[in-house]
Image: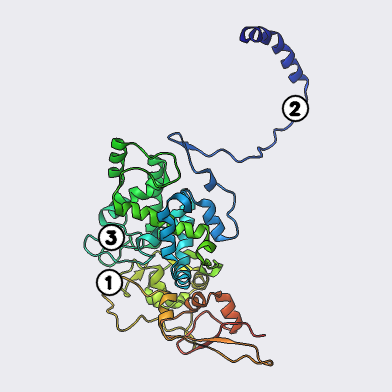
Amino acid sequence: MIAPTRRLLPALLPLILTACAGAPTRPVPAPATPTPPPVVNDVAVVPKMIRPAPPADFWASMRDSFGMPGCSADPQVTAWARTYTKMPNRFEQQVNEVLPLIVYAHKSAMQHGVAGEFALLPWVESQYRHVPGKKNRPAGMWQIMPETARTLGLRVEKNYDERLDITKSTDSVMSMMRRYYDDLGDWRLVDVAYNAGEFGLKRTIDKHGGPSDDDGLPDVPMKANTKEHLVKLMAIACIVRDPGRFNVQLPRQDNDGALQVVQVSNPQSLAQAAKQSGLSMNDLRDFNPAYRNTKGTVTSTLLLPKSAADQYKLGPVAPVDNVADVSTDTSADDDAPAETTPKRSASKANKKAVASTKKPATSSAPEVVIHKVNSGESLWSIARLHQVSVEELVKWNDLSSKSVKPGQVLKLTASR
């Protein structure tokens, strides 16, 4: 059957060429499908991470970027997901407190082509706390060891530790994750390498072989705590995949909470930066924890929520009656290192006796919710606590600036 076909080809070829020559030329239309993803070491580079624009809903975007198996990968994954959500209200509050950091980490993951689960890795490592490094201990929300910091080119100094710099540490970790994936070709193994070490994992694979192709936990020898680390990461991702299954609702992501890197034109103290941004000192240091004490000087960049970044870009503010008290807690030693669990906006505000009251509703007077500003709070932290936007608070209270002071009373609902 093959020989006759070959004999016919020389006879047909002139006819085909003649037909093509007589046909009018037309412009070649643009391809309807996107360019195929690049291939590294015979492994396609996560095509689902290459998209023209993310969905409007942040959580939908995160789900689309996941690269590991889902909730059914192993019974332990579901078990840990239920442990995390045992107290649904508390879990929702915890997610709301760290949502700006999750969003920022996810943005960095997408820039580096890293699976979306790794934006949730600090939940497993530190609950997004900015843990200070002591001697040879890990530091920052990514829990980076000193020797790893040196490999990544992160400065570790007495008064400034880039392992706690959210911008630089996140970028370095995501770059490392991408390199791990290029070497290993499996996002599950990337997490194993992050926890147990890349070279140790490679020796194990050389000796025992790589994991099978199933969608469960990778069947390569590993320590119990390394396996648990992976299970926990898959568990928090499982909750994001299907929050209703665990009786929780994920908080909305608003533009005011989106973190932005702001350039600092002239060196200034942290207190001046806090005043200019309208944040309390605690809030400012929460997003810039690399400064080990309050006497630090900002010389290059700051990480700020969008609302605070917008105000900061307007320049220094003149002192007015309602400027926030940006001084830090006087009970703390200025030269002491940052706390193991820093004061975060929503969590600390919830622990205080927040003066939020409700006026009794009547047929003639609609219900109005108010909040009395406590020392150390900012408009941004109050908005995060009550899950409203900064712009809404400004509008509802006819504020001329985004600065508030202790004792000031704010309406948390619009007048009707």
Q: Secondary structure at mark 3?
A: loop
The residue to which callout 2 is attached is: 25
Three-letter code for the amino acid on which mark 3 is drawn: Pro
**In this view, the mark in front (1 or 2):** 1
At a point 43% along the width and 80% down the height, the residue shown is: 350
Disc 3 to disc 1, C-alpha distance:
15 Å
Q: Residue at x 57, y 48 (%)?
A: 51
Q: Position of residue 151 (x, y in %)?
A: 29, 50
- Amino acid at pointer 1: Pro
Q: Quadrant of the C terminus?
A: bottom right
Extreme residue in the left direction: 135
Q: Of the residues tagged 2 and 3, which is closer to the observer? A: 3
Residue nearest the viewer, comparing 85 with 405: 85
Q: What's the residue type where badge 2 is placed?
A: Thr
Relative to 60, is 395 above or below?
below
Lower sequence index among marks 2 and 3:
2
Which of 11 and 288 lies nearest the eye of the viewer? Answer: 11
Q: Is residue 367 left or right of residue 276?
A: right
The residue that label 1 is drawn on is: 337
Between marks 2 and 3, how big is the CA–CA gap?
65 Å
Q: Position of residue 219 (x, y in %)?
A: 36, 43
Q: Kindly state the secondary structure of the residue where label 2 is placed.
A: loop
Question: Which quadrant is home to the N terminus?
Answer: top right
**Mark nearer the N terminus (1 vs 2):** 2
Classify mark 1: helix, strand or loop: loop
| Residue 61 in view in this figure | yes
Q: Relative to residue 134, is residue 46 depicted above or below?
A: above
